Amino acid sequence: METKEVLVYDNQHGFSRFLKKQFGKDINFKVYKKFSPEDNFDNIQEEYSFIFFIVYSGEDLFDFIKLQRKGVPIVVCSFNKEVLCKFKNIDDISLLDISASREELINNFQMALHTYSDAYIN
């Protein structure tokens, strides 16, 4: 069986690098800095087991709309507590505060990978 990838939307590439460094041996990450008009996510369930969506500003939310309700679990990650609070009442996404310490981040990302990824066996 072919392993699905984890989509990471990170327009500043800080956390995508962190994820690849920490978990890249076990997980295949497909990183997007920005979506192009040609990006088509109609078959997203066949390609990705879940999504880490890093939100730095409100502009990122335009790309979030392309992924929402496509049937793939989304973990919204942000430094901004206000952004996280706005997502709090949406049932089909998980939230991750990335202003936590490095150790907490590793544990939180590891928990998300264990919960959502069909490839992560750690």
Image (cartoon, rainbow, N blue to C red):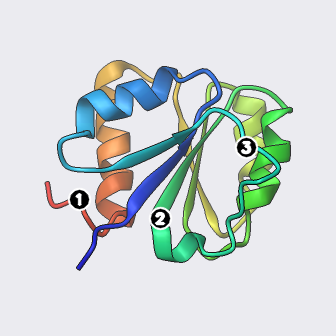
**Of the residues under marks 1 and 2, which one precedes in the sequence?**
2
Query: Which residue is denoted by mark 3 in the rendering?
Result: 35
Q: Nearer the viewer, residue 63 or 101?
A: 63
Query: Which residue is denoted by mark 2 in the rendering?
Result: 48
Give coordinates of residue 83: x percent, y percent.
Answer: 76, 36
Q: Amino acid at mark 3?
A: Phe
Nearer to us: label 2 or label 3: 3
Give coordinates of residue 30: x percent, y percent.
Answer: 46, 46
Q: Does 3 sit above or below residue 31?
A: below
Give the left or right position of residue 86, taking residue 6 as reference. Answer: right
Give coordinates of residue 76: x percent, y percent.
Answer: 61, 46
Query: Which residue is denoted by mark 1 in the rendering?
Result: 120
Q: Does 70 sit above or below residue 116?
A: below
Residue 6 - label? none
**Of the residues under marks 2 and 3, which one precedes in the sequence?**
3
Give coordinates of residue 100: x percent, y percent.
Answer: 45, 24
Badge 3 element: loop
Q: Residue at x 27, y 73 (%)?
A: 2
Nearer to us: label 1 or label 2: 2
Q: Calculate the distance from the C-alpha at mark 2 to the C-alpha at mark 3.
A: 16 Å
Q: Residue at x 81, y 43 (%)?
A: 61
